Amino acid sequence: MMRPNGIIPHSRPSLSESDIQAVIKTLKSGQLSQGPAVRKFENKIASYIGKKHAAATSSGTAALHLVLLALDVRKNDEIIIPSYVCSAVLNAVKYTKAAPIVVDIDPQTYNISFNAVEKAITGKTKAIIIPHMFGLPAEMDDFSNLDIPIIEDCALAIGATYNNRKAGSFGLLSIYSFYATKVLTSGEGGMVVSDSDDLISKIRDLRDYDNRENLVLRYNYKMTDLQASLGLSQFSHLENFLKKRKDIASHYFREFQNCSLSLPLWKEGKEHIYYRFVIKAENNASPLIKRIQQKNIICERPVYRPLHFYLNLQGFPHATEAWERSISIPCYPSLSDKEIEKIIDVVKNIF
Ligand SMILES: *Cc1c(COP(=O)(O)O)cnc(C)c1O
């Protein structure tokens, strides 16, 4: 469906009539807050990833924060994170007062660089947060050999696989986001997945303040049943969503082969879900983004600002280059064939 004004947005949720009916049904039930729908959504996600437990949260950021608290992360601890990721990751680390240790990325995959991580490890390193950028899993074999807790950030990568194993099944814990623009949405929402009984029970305790005997600093980070019923309904479309994303990406790969730009890395053993289809220009992306936007196609820098910019740190050449040259073009299941053709035409014309 083309919007009346003809503008193709950068993101657009895929909402079906069954999604809408699922939310209405929950509304009519009168059970709006955390309840049976949340529990059902948690069970679905845990079994999909192949882990024992899942705990739903109000957002992906809340999920990250609770994971760090469950690992007892505090002041003077260090958490290793990549520079090229959204600021939610930095915020979650800062909530705990731990030091964010920002490292560079692999220029081809946009994922956190294993070599850079190895060099950044100290006696104070408490955990490493590994986002699977734009839907392509990081090199989990390398990271799994480190003797430090791994938190997989799967906010952009639900359904991606690495050596036939789901992203999110490698780390001690993994987190998900169901924000409006993500692969699955519950409006806002998040999830923590883990095999650890102990960590998940800590997270369940910390997300809810009510009916508690002891005074521990707790949060209100719960998901509502309204959100979970939308999430559950969206989850039933996941395979279909992933297939559509892959089809659109294959179409782009075919059409853009001879353009003067770099296409996303494709690698044996890694299933990219193309949450974002990121192309890399030969020079600065800004004027190109403007030219595409002038054709009523909204594209963006896939990361608004790398974290080392916010922190005034020097020496992240790959993250800086990725920020300067990368462009995310619309790639989501609700794009119509006509919209896809228009995007292809415009990109081919400009590149
Ligand atoms: C979106 C996102 C988050 C934060 O999720 P919210 O639900 O928006 O709080 C964390 N990490 C990554 C990689 C994200 O893309």
Image: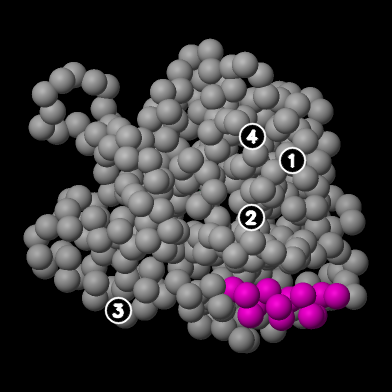
**What percent of the width, then of the height, locates residue 286?**
78, 52
| Residue at numbered disc 3 | 18
| Residue at numbered disc 2 | 137
| Residues tagged 3 and 4 counted as in contact (Cβ below 8 A) | no
Dominant secondary-structure state across the stretch colored magenta: helix
**Which residue is located at x 45 percent, y 51 percent?**
176
| Residue at numbered disc 1 | 113
Instruction: Indicate the secondary structure of the residue bearing disc 4.
Output: loop
State which tag comes first along the sequence, 4 or 1. 1
Name the residue nearer the viewer: 154 or 234. 154
Magenta stretch encompasses residue 214? no
Looking at the picture, does residue 194 appear above or below residue 25? above
Name the residue nearer the viewer: 311 or 247. 247
Q: How many neighbours does mark 2 have within 10 angstroms: few (below 14), some (14-19), or many (20 or more)?
A: many
The three-letter code of the residue at mark 3 reads: Ser
| Residue at numbered disc 4 | 146
Give residue 296's quadrant in the image: bottom right
Instruction: Indicate the secondary structure of the residue bearing disc 3.
Output: helix
Query: Gap in Å between the C-alphas at discs 3 and 4?
Result: 44 Å
**What percent of the width, then of the height, locates residue 222?**
27, 44
